[in-house]
Image (cartoon, grey):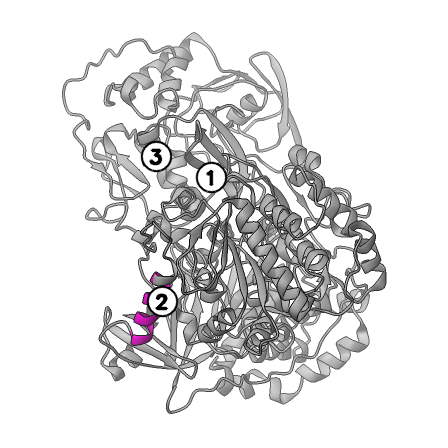
């Protein structure tokens, strides 16, 4: 599309079953009851001047530009605050209104710089537009006297400036921070003429304040007072392309606004059904990595990992890779090869990688990063409900009465949805947080959890069993729902189990560390508080009992009838942009697309007929099994697309040993990541800005990814995989990702009704999309569960084998922070590192004092697996006996201390429970120094000096 500002109807849309008809400037208009006059006029194609009003904020009525005349009503009411009424007759353009509006606009302009021709918002400024709309031609008041034209510009934020001389104090930025983001970082300081926008305390800048740089204030600003630095530097965009963010599993829709082939800014798309026009610092601003100097744009090969890389042509690299893989297969068999599907790439690209492994390599040795994050979700929800995905759309939270957040940090990990959740909490919903750490959602402006259950890491199942005990023994079960929708015999067996005294809150209090009375209160609130919704994250799945915890959550939802309607459900918050899609595409070694087991003959027959090759009926190796087999000399070659297993997977030493033992490691990525230290072939990848395809977010929403610019490496990622397939002798001839989606739809029942034409027309679709659900499925299990009857599963608490003791008395748990993403390969190459330049270890004041540690000190973090060093920060966000860190920076290599313990059903690593000891240190350990040197040597490119981004 060309460039034009997104339509703004002035005030939010209203949901109402009652319609109201009125007359606006002689035209009859019919709108839902409660709609404002301003919005009614806009929906009818009219335009009432406005400055303080915008349709993602509540009506405010301060600028006095939107005045109208209404027959039978005194004065000139503000159209943004006046609701419509049946038979109302509105006049938006009269001589009286023209005079009033022009006078108001004169006051604004009299205290505003007249530098429109050189202003970065020229021809893209609402103040400029409205001045023209009211017919302003001169200013009677002159420009003498007191004004604000000497105010200083706050340029502290790396992404945007605040030029106070351009500010008209309309309050839109303050209201956006309050209503949309929910941070309440901005305020209006002073009164009358002295009023000005302040980022917190008077001594604060935007950077030092509590501002989270979501961009809501910048988007709301009607002038250039708040303006992206990139717009100032590059100029006004010329065109815009609607696409989908490539960060977390929320899946925000953005307008990529371009000037030539240069990206100027990413603006959240108002019609985006996942984000509803909001964004976070990553999606809004942290896209500069796509053109970072560290990016590798030419294929490279080397004979051995201790040699420098050698840049080669695409043909030479692909031939080198294919010859190596053919030789491995000839010497060791097809099962000596495998592949890893990226959760950052598109559905179409993931589908092709698993197809390459199965049809090209002749093995089911394919896996994805979901192995180390949400594989227990797939197992647990498929077992209990019949579908390996969440039950609700994000809009559903607007109807929740009780929200349970367990093992998730939505304000950091899924910030746009976190903002929507906070909005519902400010409206009165109750909150239960089950987390060993006091996350921001526990206590933030105008929000405080009704119950925070700071459980001991590793005791999720015990806490949920105790909640179930209360619900069953106190008669809080929704028996009608259970009898109608679930297997009653299985429920009875489960109810008998949880009713045992050993599952009571009192009995388990010494195990969980949660006071029994608090746990009882939380259970009663969830069971009786109305619509109860559970949202969970990696703090649930990344445990030795991850699958058991997911099934325990499902048990609670079924027992209380909180399934199958808006406002309820079981909702995994997926970590990466397409981790749901990667799972959907058949990226697990035991399943083909649509979660159908490879042992099913009918399913295999479909794929064999489509692909023309036999499919092995035996499941292949999971990622940990591939590494084990490699160290045993049985697994020799791997193709890794868009994953950095050396930094993200547990027990770094073991991962390194497995990779080093292979004859050919192919890394297909944007950068020479940590895994590439052990690679023999590097195939440069393309960013989300350079490709067409689809992502599937945490709510099962399939959304278009549209090419914004040409691939800097020459090929989209699906094309690279196809080139590799051809080099291996496969006759693949896709010309566009839409053809791959058509193949997915033919082979995958839940995607049967999905095609690019529908996605372009409708914006997105939520699977299943098929004959049974032709319009998609925002809410799952409405009439019944996919598996038929809901299945209650007994989930007995089994303590992890990872125990504390005299040598390792503390428990380490890990997570993410707002400004960084996953292993940091993208965000570390942006200005986001201003907020989080290194991983820090959170430690409780008591534990710190006992060890002589202060904030900022270097500490040694040691476990049974290994050790690393990092700086400490002393905080009571963690409980005594618990420490916490992130894993975004390779200099820390936090996973060198995590163990090989994993979920009993899926091998998902137990990242969240590691017994450790913390002692003072003088700086980076010898191992870190050795690792850094090995990485530097591995990144050498013949004839080029290359430094890692850090």
Secondary structure type for disc 2 = helix
Q: Position of residue 155 (x, y in %)?
A: 24, 40
Q: Residue 234 versus residue 148: which sits nearer the camera?
A: 234
Q: Position of residue 468 (x, y in %)?
A: 63, 76
Q: Which mark is residue 230?
A: 3
Nearer to us: label 3 or label 1: 1
Q: Count neighbours of disc 1 (C-alpha within 10 A) and say few if under 14, some if 14 to 19, many if 20 or more.
A: some
Q: Which residue is mark 1?
A: 712
As for residue 806 lying within the magenta part, the answer is: no
Question: Residue, x 66% and y 37% (percent of image)?
Answer: 735
SS class, disc 3: helix
Location of the C terminus (image quadrant): bottom left
Work out how far the residue at label 3 is from the one at label 2, CA to CA, in angstroms.
Answer: 37 Å
* Number of the front mark, 2 or 1: 2
The CA span between labels 2 and 1 is 29 Å
Residue 481, given in percent of the width and then of the height, sits at 76, 65
**Callout 1: helix, strand or loop?**
loop
Q: Is residue 931 magenta?
A: yes
- Circle 2 is placed at which residue position? 934
- Number of marks drawn: 3
Q: Are marks 3 and 2 in contact (CB under 8 Å)?
A: no
């Amino acid at each position: 599309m060309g460039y034009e500002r997104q339509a703004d109807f002035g005030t939010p849309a209203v949901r109402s079953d009652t319609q109201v008809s009125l007359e606006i400037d002689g035209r009859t208009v019919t709108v839902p009851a409660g709609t404002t006059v301003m919005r009614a006029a806009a929906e009818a194609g009219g335009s009432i001047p406005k400055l303080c009003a915008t349709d993602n904020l509540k009506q405010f009525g301060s600028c006095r530009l939107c005045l109208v005349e209404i027959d039978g009503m005194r004065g000139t009411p503000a159209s943004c605050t006046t609701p419509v009424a049946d038979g109302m007759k509105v006049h938006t353009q009269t001589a009286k209104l023209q005079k009033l509006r022009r006078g108001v606009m004169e006051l604004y302009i009299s205290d505003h710089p007249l530098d429109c021709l050189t202003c970065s918002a020229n021809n893209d400024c609402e103040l400029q537009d409205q001045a023209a709309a009211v017919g302003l031609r001169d200013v009677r008041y002159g420009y003498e006297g007191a004004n604000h034209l000497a105010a200083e510009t706050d340029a502290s934020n790396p992404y945007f400036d605040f030029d106070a001389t351009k500010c008209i104090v309309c309050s839109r930025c303050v209201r956006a921070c309050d209503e949309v983001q929910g941070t309440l970082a901005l305020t209006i300081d002073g009164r009358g003429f002295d009023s000005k926008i302040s980022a917190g305390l008077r001594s604060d800048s935007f950077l030092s304040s509590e501002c989270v740089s979501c961009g809501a204030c910048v988007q709301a600003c009607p002038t250039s007072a708040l303006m992206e630095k990139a717009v100032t530097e590059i100029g006004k965009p010329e065109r815009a392309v609607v696409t989908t963010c490539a960060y977390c599993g929320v899946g925000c829709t953005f307008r990529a606004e371009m000037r030539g082939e240069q990206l100027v800014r990413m603006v959240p798309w108002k019609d985006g059904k996942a984000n509803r026009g909001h964004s976070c610092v990553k999606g809004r601003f942290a896209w500069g990595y796509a053109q970072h100097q560290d990016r590798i744009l030419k294929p490279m090969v080397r004979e051995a990992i201790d040699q420098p890389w050698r840049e080669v042509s695409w043909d030479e690299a692909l031939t080198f890779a294919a010859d190596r893989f053919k030789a491995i297969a000839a010497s060791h068999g097809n099962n000596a090869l495998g592949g890893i599907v990226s959760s950052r790439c598109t559905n179409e690209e993931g589908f092709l990688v698993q197809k390459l492994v199965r049809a090209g390599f002749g093995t089911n040795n394919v896996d994805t990063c979901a192995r180390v994050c949400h594989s227990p979700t797939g197992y647990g929800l498929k077992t209990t409900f019949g579908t390996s995905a969440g039950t609700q759309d994000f809009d559903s939270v607007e109807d929740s009465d009780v929200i349970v957040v367990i093992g998730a940090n939505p304000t950091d990990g899924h910030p746009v949805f976190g903002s929507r959740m906070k909005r519902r909490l400010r409206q009165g919903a109750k909150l239960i947080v089950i987390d060993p750490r006091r996350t921001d959602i526990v206590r933030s402006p105008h929000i405080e959890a009704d119950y925070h259950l700071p459980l001991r890491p590793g005791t999720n199942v015990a806490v949920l069993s105790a909640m179930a005990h209360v619900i069953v023994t106190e008669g809080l079960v929704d028996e009608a729902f259970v009898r109608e929708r679930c297997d009653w015999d299985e429920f009875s067996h489960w109810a008998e189990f949880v009713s045992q005294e050993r599952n009571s809150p009192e009995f388990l209090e010494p195990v969980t560390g949660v006071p029994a009375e608090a746990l009882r209160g939380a259970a009663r609130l969830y069971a009786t508080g109305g619509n109860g919704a559970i949202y969970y994250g990696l703090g649930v799945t990344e445990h030795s009992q991850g699958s058991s915890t997911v099934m325990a959550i499902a048990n609670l939802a079924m027992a209380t009838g909180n399934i199958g309607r808006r406002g309820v459900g079981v909702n995994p918050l997926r970590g990466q942009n397409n981790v749901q899609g990667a799972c959907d595409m058949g990226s697990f070694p035991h399943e083909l697309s649509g979660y159908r087991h490879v042992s099913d003959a009918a399913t295999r027959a479909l794929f064999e007929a489509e692909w023309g090759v036999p499919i092995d009926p035996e499941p292949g190796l999971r990622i940990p099994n591939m590494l084990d087999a490699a160290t045993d000399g049985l697994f020799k070659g791997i193709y890794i697309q868009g994953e950095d297993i050396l930094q993200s997977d547990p027990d770094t030493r073991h991962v390194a040993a497995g990779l080093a033992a292979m004859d050919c490691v192919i890394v297909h990525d944007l950068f020479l990541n940590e895994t590439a230290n052990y690679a023999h072939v590097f195939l440069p990848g393309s960013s989300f800005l350079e490709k067409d395809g689809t992502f599937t977010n945490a709510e099962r929403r399939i959304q278009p990814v549209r090419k914004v610019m040409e691939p800097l490496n020459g090929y989209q990622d699906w094309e690279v995989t196809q080139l590799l397939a051809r080099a291996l002798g496969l006759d693949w001839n896709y010309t566009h990702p839409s053809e791959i989606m058509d193949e997915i739809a033919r082979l995958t029942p839940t995607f049967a009704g999905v095609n690019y034409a529908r996605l372009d027309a409708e914006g997105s679709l939520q699977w299943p999309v098929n004959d049974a659900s032709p319009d998609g499925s925002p809410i799952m299990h409405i009439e019944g569960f996919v598996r038929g009857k809901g299945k209650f599963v007994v989930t007995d608490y089994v303590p992890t084998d990872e125990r504390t003791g005299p040598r390792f008395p503390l428990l380490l748990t890990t997570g993410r922070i707002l400004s960084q993403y996953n292993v940091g390969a993208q965000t570390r190459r942006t200005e986001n590192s201003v907020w989080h330049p290194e991983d820090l270890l959170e430690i409780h004041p008591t534990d710190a004092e006992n060890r002589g540690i202060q904030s900022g000190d270097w500490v040694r973090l040691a476990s049974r697996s290994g050790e690393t060093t990092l700086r400490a920060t002393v905080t009571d966000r963690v409980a005594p006996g618990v420490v916490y860190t992130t894993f975004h920076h390779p200099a820390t290599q936090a996973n060198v201390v995590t163990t090989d313990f994993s979920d009993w059903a899926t091998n998902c690593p137990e990242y969240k429970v590691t017994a450790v000891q913390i002692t003072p240190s003088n700086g980076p350990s010898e191992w870190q120094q050795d690792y850094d040197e090995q990485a530097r040597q591995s990144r050498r490119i013949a004839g080029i000096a290359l430094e890692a981004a850090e």
